[in-house]
Each structure stands twice: as structure tokens, then as C-alpha cells.
Image (tube, rainbow, N blue to C red):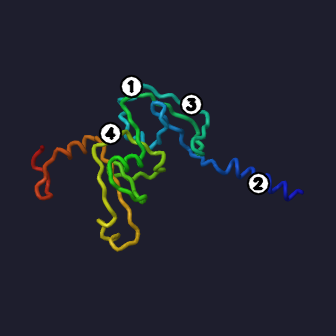
Amino acid sequence: MKPLLTLLLLFITTLFFGQNNKTKEAAMFLDSTFISAESMKYIDPNGIESINIIKNDTIIDSNHYVGQIHITSKNPKKYTFISLEQVKSEFTKIKSNDVIYMVNGAFIKENNETFKIDKNYILKVEITNSNEFYNFRNSPTQFDIINILGKTKENLDNENKILLRGYNAIGSK
């Protein structure tokens, strides 16, 4: 009876406590929309009206967060958040599942399901196939890289440059 009780207790403990992935981060909400901390890099700080911090632990999608940060923007209707999968379906014709995402040349290192980006922030989307890399041409591993270029000052300036034969810009559009 004692081994059965021990096994039952171990099973219940694993069932209830083993499924939560505890992070050391707070859950972030912008205008009541759950977004990742990585997504906040692409929000204009001048558009923030207020920040409210709640210290209670919370569980979202079986992830345990150590608190909540609620951010209210000055214009809540300004942001239209979309997931990376939505970027893939709306801005590309890629059908494969093997995709690496980048924003402004930086790889998205966190969970692709929780990362969201403002649709109005996207300037353009560039796609590179693994066949374009010399080391991957004969590899059985095939993937696409989706680089989302945002409306940063640098990207907007680069959009207006005119290139001659791949050299430096000599004018602007």
C-alpha cells in the first residue's frame, strides 16, 4: 500500500507542478494584449501613457510569470499586433514550416508563438532561402529566413537610396 501511495503522490505532483514553465520575467500586456518582452523593443516609448505593475504570479499558456506589467498607450487603436505566423501568411508565399525569423537583422530567439509585432511597424519583409547560402546548397536541411524590416530611421533612409551597380548610394529617390 505504501509504494502505491508514493507512486500516486509522485504522479499528482508531476501532473500539477511539472507542467508549468516558470520564467523570471513578468507577463507584459500592451493595451490588454499579451505580448512578449522581446516585442517591446519595437514599441515607440513616446507612445506610452502609463505603466501599471501587478506583483501577483500568473500562469498564461502553462507558463508561470512572476508578475504582470500592464502598459497603456496614448492611442490604443494605433497598434495592430500580429504573430510571426501571420506575417508569414500575409507577407510571403512560403508554405514550409521550417522558417527562421528576424526583425531588423536580429534573430528572434524566444518562442515564436508568443512574439507579436505591430503590423503598422513593418516596412517590408525580405525572404532568403537556405539554397542561397553556399554551405547549405547540398544539405538536406532546407529552410527560409524571413527578415522583417521595421520603420526605423535607418531602414527608411536606406529605402530612399539609389544604388549604382551595388556601390554606395550617390543620391536619393
For mark 3, what is the residue? Answer: 54
Q: Residues within 10 Å of mark 2 (few under 14, many from 20)?
A: few
- Amino acid type at mark 1: Lys
What residue sits 38% from the left and 35% below the top? 80
Name the residue beneath numbered marker 1.
Answer: 74
Mark 3: amino acid: Ile
Where residue 38 sits, quadrant-wise, is top left
Q: Nearer the viewer, mark 2 or mark 3?
A: 2
Quarter of the image for the C terminus: give it: top left
Residue 99, by quadrant, is: bottom left
Percent x, y of residue 79: 38, 33
Label 4 crowding class (10 Å Cα cut-off): few <14, some 14-19, many 20+?
Answer: some
Q: Earlier in the sequence, mark 4 or mark 1?
A: 1
Q: CA distance from mark 1 to mark 2?
A: 50 Å
Q: Which mark is residue 121?
A: 4
Q: Nearer the viewer, mark 3 or mark 4?
A: 4
Q: Earlier in the sequence, mark 1 or mark 2?
A: 2
Which amino acid type is shown beneath numbered disc 4? Tyr
Q: Amino acid at mark 2?
A: Leu
Q: Which residue is mark 2?
A: 10
Q: Which structural element holds mark 2?
A: helix
| Residue at 37% over, 39% down | 118
Q: Are marks 3 and 4 in contact (CB under 8 Å)?
A: no
**Residue 14 located left or right of residue 64:** right
Q: Is residue 169 left or right of residue 73?
A: left
Comes first in the chain, label 1 or label 3: 3
